[in-house]
Image: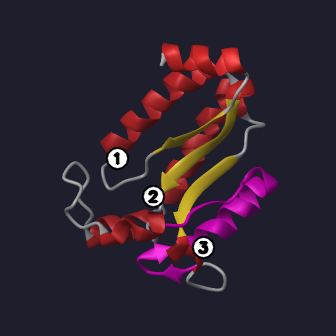
Amino acid sequence: WKNLATFVKANGVKVLLGTEVTCNETLDAQSWIWAKGLLKMLGPAHVMGLGIGNELELLYTLGNRRKVAPVTPQCIEKLWAGGRLWKQWQATVEEFDAMGFSSVPLTSVFGGYALAGSPFVNTKKSQVATFVRKVLKSYGSRFVFTFNFY
């Protein structure tokens, strides 16, 4: 991370940094540890935002394609209806803020399928609308939308 942090600071740029939300909580915790290491080196002035989770609306489609974090119906149930995503999101933001980043924007990266509702999809397997309502209620305009359209 040292070379990246040096480059970022020397060029006065900012980083949008992401951390995973998968069906492997150990992997997620390690991803966050790595992210925190880089965040400490960069400091708030060089962080554009923190992304927590990537294309979670499509997670249920992965099945066993990702061997280190196979996706099961039980995982999807726990993540959305069981509240694991929301709890992990809040815990991550709490740590992020305690590190001095409380003014830095927050996001989750969504793909186009997230917009398959009014405006967001909200099925048992993909509860984006419910998540967005919670995050906006808790974090307001600090939350910013990020979309990947392929």
Q: Earlier in the sequence, mark 3 or mark 2?
A: 2
Say if mark 1 contacts mark 2, CB within 8 Å.
yes
Task: Find disc 3 in the rendering and name its residue.
Answer: 130
Q: Which residues are magenta?
A: 121-150
Q: Earlier in the sequence, mark 3 or mark 1?
A: 1
Of the residues shown, which amino acid type is indicated by label 1?
Glu
Task: Find disc 1 in the rendering and name its residue.
Answer: 25
Where residue 28 appears, as percent x and y from the top left, is 39, 43
Q: Earlier in the sequence, mark 1 or mark 2?
A: 1
Report how many numbered discs are placed on residues in the image. 3
User: What SS does tag 1 mark?
Assistant: helix
Of the residues shown, which amino acid type is indicated by label 3?
Thr
Q: Residue at x 71, y 55 (%)?
A: 144
**Viewer-proximal residue, 82 or 65?**
65
Distance CA(mark 3)–CA(mark 1):
22 Å
**Residue 19 colored in magenta in the image:** no
Q: Residue at x 59, y 34 (%)?
A: 95
Q: Quadrant of residue 10?
A: top right
Q: Look at the picture and state if 63 lies above or below 92.
A: below
- Which label belongs to residue 84? 2
Of the residues shown, which amino acid type is indicated by label 2?
Arg
Q: Look at the picture and state if 115 lies above or below 141.
A: below
Q: Is residue 93 left or right of residue 45?
A: left
Where residue 72 appears, as percent x and y from the top left, is 25, 67
- Which label belongs to residue 67? none
